[in-house]
Amino acid sequence: MSQRSILMIGCGKMGGALLEHWMSGGDDFTIVDPALEQVPAPARLVADAGELGDASFDVIVVAIKPQMIDDILPAHASRLAPGGYVLSIAAGCAAARISRAMNGAPVVRVMPNLPAAVGQGVSGICPDPAVTEEQRAHAEAMMARTGTAITVDAEDKLDRVTAVAGSGPGYVFEIARTYVAAAQELGFSAQEARAMVLGTMAGTVAMAQADEAGDLEALRNSVTSKGGTTAAGLDALNGDDTLTRLMRSTLQAAYDRAVELR
């Protein structure tokens, strides 16, 4: 895949996290963001679109807040080169709205999550029907540099990715926080509890990922002896399916909110 010129409109926390990994692909990046003072070399930073002159770009990345779309994007529509496409990470902003603001350009919507900052993100990718196979492949390659990329065929599924993966780090951080707090109540210091909990979570996930065909229930059972300590803990955790119901309601609530924000 040949090198492409990419214009990134906005570069906040998520955009910056993605940019660090995107640049490893060899594409040429220009960033427009009046709030930034610098970007990683060799990307170019301009504070105002007027500094771009008559330059055109193969890809335009939309990394601004959804409420800014209609005011900012139309001024950049003419900068998209023939055969180019738009990649949007603007949460909750439909591809049709992005395309209208960009004179009908093909749009790939992406829902990344925060671990992309360390190259271990999980991103949903949804190309609109006008996106070519080559454009889709380029978008997938970009997101693969940030972790796992899952392509879906409808924006409703992207909302479901949002509920599971996009919002997922928040759930995991909250589970870890309460786990650490409970460990402290057993008599450990905050530092000790944090080390044990995060180490246990990281090691357990690594085991599950190493056993790709492994059933999670079977893995759970493999560390659970009848009448033992793990069995007692699991019975308190989910013996009456409270945790199962809670996780279902958590994902449903996040999905419902994503639908409301469309």
Image (cartoon, rainbow, N blue to C red):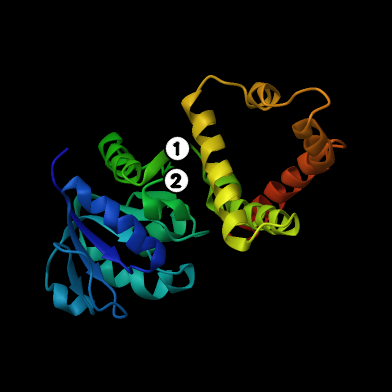
Residue at image position (47%, 26%) is 210
**Which residue occupies the foreground of this view, 220 or 243?**
220
Q: Is residue 64 left or right of residue 75?
A: right
Give amino acid for label 2. Answer: Ser
Badge 2: few (under 14), some or many (20 or more) residues near its Cα, within 10 Å?
A: many
Q: Is residue 54 visible?
A: yes
Q: Residue 162, how many percent across, how many down?
A: 56, 50
* Three-letter code for the amino acid on which mark 1 is drawn: Ile
Quadrant of the snapshot with the C terminus = bottom right
In the visual, does 133 lie left or right of 169? left
- The numbered dot on residue 150 is 1
Other residues around mark 1 within 10 Å, as few (<14) / some (14–19) / many (≥20): some
Whole-angstrom CA distance, mark 1 to mark 2, is 6 Å
Residue 48 x/y as whole percent: 23, 79
Q: Which mark is residue 123?
A: 2
Dividing the picture into quarters, in which one does residue 235 lie?
Answer: top right
- The residue closer to the viewer here, 245 or 232, is 232
**Proximity of marks 1 and 2: CB atoms separated by less than 8 Å:** yes
Which residue is painted at 44% across and 45% down in the image? 123
